[in-house]
Amino acid sequence: MLRKSVGLLLAMIIILGGQMGFAVSNHPVDASQIILAEPTSEKITNDKQIFVTVNITNVMVTDHPITMSLVRIENKLPFADALGDNLKVSVMKLSSFATGEIDRNTLFNITYNTATPEYSDNYEKETQVINRFFELKDLIAANSNEITSINKKYRFDLIANNSEEVEKLSSELNDIYKHWVKLKTNLVDYKKEYAQLQVQYGRYFETQIMVDKINNLSYYKIIGKLPNGTYKIRFLDDVSQLIKEFTFNVVDKEESIKLIDPITTKVN
């Protein structure tokens, strides 16, 4: 079933521990019509062969193939050792964990490039992105803390939408109020920019393992054994937007006896 237009009320639906996200464009094949039969476990031991089995319940896939990609999420930045003196943060900070949780609207509305990444000379552009990414982290934290501190003391939130009450403020309090409002405005701008850089930063840690087209109702692919790490299987539409994503970890055999977390399938 094709997704409803953006103008309709969007319901958050939990499926297999994941949540539905919605993109701007319609997908020829909906997330619910892509059935990932294998793998289904969030943890797979490194002694086992991995294979992907997919069943599609929409015949439109024959005319509108979808792309399946498998990426590995590296812990360490692959080109960290090649970064020069322009890097303003410690190399120790450059991990995939610093990416954080990407906003769902962003996740399902960006374009995914499955080609081999091309980097700038001496990683100059990438260094600028990394520097600004961490700078924004600090700015967001600092602004949030100052906003909270000011509001705790003056409770400006109680009069923010009341111009008459604002006009009653003394000259000194009015200056503090204007500063508080400016901080809130800056915070919104910082978060918007951060959301975009968060995607770019996160992509630096991705290594494409395989990319394939699916144009049949049944699909089967042997991946083989994979080294320990975090992996994502993504299903993309014809404009390379995300339809569905499944995350799994390859672990040592001994690790498999530990408690397995809920399966993290994200669908659109």
Image (cartoon, rainbow, N blue to C red):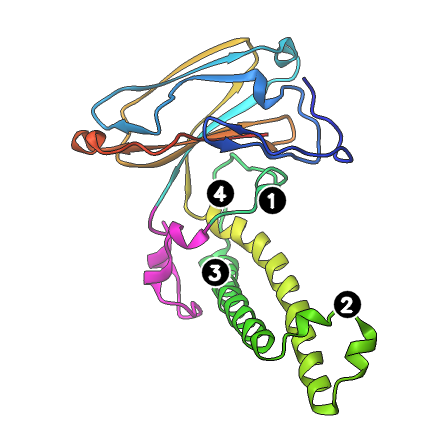
Q: Which residue is mark 2?
A: 161
Give the CA separation, mark 4 to mark 3: 16 Å
Marks 2, 4: nearer the viewer: 2
Q: Please state the horizontal and vertical placement of residue 212, each as a whole percent of the image.
A: 49, 22
Residue under the image location 36 percent in, 49 percent down: 78
Quadrant for the C terminus, please. Answer: top right
Q: Which residue is mark 4?
A: 117
Q: Amino acid at mark 2?
A: Asn
115 or 173: nearer the viewer = 173
Q: Please state the horizontal and vertical placement of residue 69, each as a whole percent of the image.
A: 47, 28
| Quadrant in the rendering for residue 143 | bottom right
* Whether label 3 touches label 2, CB < 8 Å: no
Quadrant for the N terminus, please. Answer: top right
Residue under the image location 23 percent in, 28 percent down: 46
Residue under the image location 39 percent in, 66 percent down: 84
Q: Please state the horizontal and vertical placement of residue 224, each as a whole percent of the image.
A: 30, 21
Residue 130 shows which numbered tag? 3
The answer to whether residue 125 is left or right of residue 41 is right
